[in-house]
Amino acid sequence: MTDVFDHPWLGGLFADPDMAALWSPDAQLAGMRAFEAAFSRALGRAGLADSAQAEAAAQVIEGMSFDMDDLSKGTGQDGVVVPRLVKQIKAAAGDAAGAVHKGATSQDVIDTATALAMRDTLALVDARLGELADALEGLSDRFGDRPLMGRTRMQAATEITVADRIAPWLLPLADHRARIAEARPRIARLQLGGASGDRKDLGDKAGTVAADMAAALGLENPPRAWHAMRDGVAEFAGILSLVTGTLGKMGQDIALMAQQGIEEIALSGGGTSSAMAHKQNPVLAELLVTLARFNAVQLSALHQATVHEQERSGAAWALEWMVLPHMAQATGRALAAAIRLAGQVKRIGKPE
């Protein structure tokens, strides 16, 4: 069974190929590969492994293929993919195997790959927020002075302008972009702690190795591992839910404005009905509401996943793997849909 994001027909509504690519198995494997290659090179430069062997190991890691069936079986047995991943790497590295994974742990590998995905997700979300802001500013320029009935608690209130209606869709976008910029250092962080998160196996070279890896991977270098401190992951999820919440408000407003008998907005490209040929359903507006509610529900799971016992949790950690990719895809799709929806607007304001 597939989920809605890659379903053969539901995917036509929910899929976002660009965001899906950032969280795909290939991307996750690339992130783990990048960690291991950077780690081997850092070991060599820090004198914790022979430098020639370290570079040879890194090159093997970057070029090798993995036995996916073995990785799947290993994950079922070990609960994580990394033990079999490292076993395959060491077998391929041969004499250079001593420069592979020495002083790292499974969580370092997987969390760093996740941090890379979160970093790239924030970049995509930020770019689309900018594109949507431009589109909404264009609508406000075109229609902003037109009259519109203001409504409070679903009842007619006083007359406002179209610009007044658009402002709550538009103004939060700048705040979201500011949140992303401010939170990025707490989210896009290297994970390196070793067995119990204390970097003990790396000795007095731990700081050197971590700085080397963070620079190579384009991630922040925190002062210690965040194995059991998941606030950065939860903050990432919170940003996604805030973004989709704003877009859901926009979608809800547009769906209400499009009601027959109110008709305060005219859209092109509405959805058709199998039974009623006269209908033009505001499909994208409705989708924004659905995705906002989806992310709001998923956010509670990520807050549950902040509770990690002692130095590492298997249960809370695995919950992140189930939820984060879907929240990212929902956010990417919501932004793409909102941009397209803004382009479908032919008129906003009281019908003439």
Image: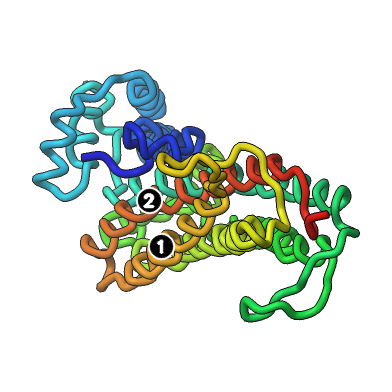
Q: Mark 1 belongs to which amino acid? A: Trp
Q: Residue at x 16, y 36 (%)?
A: 72
Sort mark 1 into few (<14), some (14-19) or many (20+) by Cα contacts within 10 Å. many
Q: Does the rendering let one see residue 44?
A: no
Residue 45 relative to residue 220: left or right = left
The answer to the question of whether label 1 and label 2 lie on touching residues, with beta carbons closer than 8 A, is: yes
Q: What is the spatial separation of the Cα atoms under label 1 and label 2, in whole angstroms?
A: 9 Å
Which secondary structure, mark 1?
A: loop
Quarter of the picture containing the C terminus is bottom right
Residue 111: numbered disc: 2
Up/down of 66 relative to 293, above or below: above
Q: Mark 2 belongs to which amino acid? A: Asp
Q: Which residue is mark 1?
A: 226
- The x and y percentages for residue 100 are 29, 34
Nearer to me, 308 or 55: 308
Q: Residue at x 44, y 60 (%)?
A: 295
Which secondary structure, mark 2?
A: helix
Q: Residue at x 39, y 48 (%)?
A: 325
Up/down of 96 relative to 300, above or below: above
- The x and y percentages for residue 202 are 36, 51
Q: Where, by quadrant of the figure, is residue 66 drawn?
A: top left
Q: Of tags 1 and 2, which is closer to the observer?
A: 2
Q: Residue at x 66, y 60 (%)?
A: 257
Sort mark 2 into few (<14), some (14-19) or many (20+) by Cα contacts within 10 Å. many
Residue 253 relative to residue 304: left or right = right
Q: How is the image coloured?
A: rainbow
Nearer to me, 268 or 233: 268
- The x and y percentages for residue 14 are 44, 43
Nearer to me, 272 or 229: 272
- The x and y percentages for residue 227 are 35, 61
Nearer to me, 347 or 315: 347
Residue 127: numbered disc: none
